[in-house]
Image: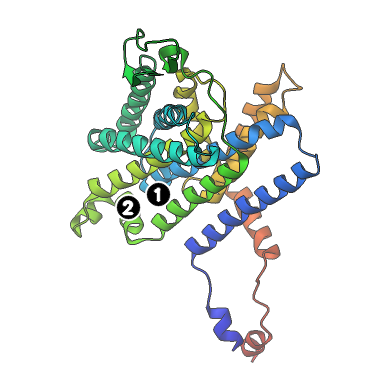
Amino acid sequence: MGKKIKDRKMSPYTKNAAISYSIVTAGFVIITLLNMLGMVSSSLQGQLVPICTYIIMAVSLNLVVGISGELSLGHAGFMSVGAFSGIVVSGLLENSSMPDLARLACAVLVGAIFAGIAGFLIGIPVLRLRGDYLAIVTLAFGEIIKNIMNIVYACKDDTGFHISTNPEIGQGSNARMLLNGPMGATAVKKISTFGSGFVLVLIALFVVQNIMNSRQGRAIMACRDNRIAAESIGLNVMKYKLMAFTISASLAGMGGALFGLNYSSLLPIKFNFNTSVLILVFVVLGGIGNIWGSIIAATILTILPEALRQFADYRMLTYAVVLILVMIGTNNLKIRAWFENLWEKIKPGKDTDPDAEGGSAA
């Protein structure tokens, strides 16, 4: 009987999924309890929704970088599409009888759809490239999206909703600008919460983990590992890479909507190249293809700059040194082997079956 139970081991994908869900759930429960006890600072409270957003962004980008094996530097562009489309939807529904949670759900859904469409359209030409060329073109498309947002004006007035590149839109005294070109979105009603961010993180994890453990996910990884071999057995490489890219963009739009509705004003310049690189740093630092590693990296690197604010003159220097040391540590074979040996000694569920020991002794 003991041997049968012992043989029922979780697959690596199931184990990683369990770790990811456990980390997120434990973090949410601990922060919620500490907040109820008044032990969470106002600074950390302001970072809770951005932390959830960056976890979603890191997990979604890992689907492209880690699972699909492509380097994308335009992820902030899809985040901006989701953010501003979500803000517009929330503004249009603001005077309705719809509760804030329902408005947020609508905004997140629309943001995910629009970002997914943008990802699909951009992915068709972009994914025909490989390596550095793909990275440069995705970077260019990310900057194009940001610049498009700089010239978009959206307004709600007595006659309805208007969107244009002309700033002279909107008529009547009740006209309200939802998007104001380079000024971005202003007077946004903040409806994002830590609880809603937690739910969206779970959704992002559910989508990515199930893709990894599906037939399509195995096809995507086969295309990543050996493109020629994948094509030789009849896999449509372009189809599977486009699938991963589109889903990743859609999840980024979902995170962008959550992020946009957490601030009273938001500028398009926020979603520039630096934001895309920051999200990529989360993925690389947590381990390419490692979902729970991305969760931890996104959380720590979002909190760290604010925690170092008291060292104003050396804050970014310390931040950079920490990044360098962590990357050296994670890529040093001796250090990694030491941590792996330590984990083998302390990990739960270690084989201590007396029957097995007796059998081996015999």
Give the structural element (helix, strand or loop) at label 1: helix
Provide the secondary structure element on which disc 2 rests: helix
* Residue situated furthest top in the rendering: 168
Say if mark 2 contacts mark 1, CB within 8 Å: yes
The image position of residue 175, as x and y in percent, is 43, 14
- The residue type indicated by label 1 comes to Ile
Q: Looking at numbered disc 2 in the image, what kind of residue is underneath it? A: Ile
Question: Percent x, y for residue 358?
Answer: 66, 89
The disc at residue 82 is none
Q: Relative to 130, is 295 on the left or the right?
A: right
Asked if residue 35 is positioned above or below residue 178 in the image, the reply reads below
CA neighbours of label 2 inside 10 A, class few (<14), some (14 to 19), many (20+) = many
Q: Residue at x 51, y 29 (%)?
A: 260
Task: In the rendered view, tell whether residue 334 sits above or below residue 15.
Answer: above
| Distance (Cα) linking label 2 and label 1 | 7 Å
Q: Quadrant of the N terminus?
A: bottom right
* Residue at the image position 51 percent from the left and 18 percent from the top: 186
Q: Which residue is mark 2?
A: 220
- Quarter occupied by the C terminus: bottom right
Residue denoted by label 1: 67
Q: In this view of the protein, can residue 295 be seen by the observer?
A: yes
Q: Is residue 329 visible?
A: no
Q: Nearer the viewer, residue 299 or 108?
A: 108
Count neighbours of disc 1 (C-alpha within 10 A) and say few if under 14, some if 14 to 19, many if 20 or more: many
| Residue 56 image point, x, y percent | 50, 41
Please state if 236 lies on the left or on the right of 349 as rendered.
left
Tell me which colouring the rendered structure shows. Answer: rainbow
Decide which of tag 2 and tag 1 comes sooner along the chain: 1
- Tell which of 54 and 94 is nearer to you: 94
Residue 162 is drawn in which quadrant?
top left
Q: Nearer the viewer, residue 142 or 315?
A: 142
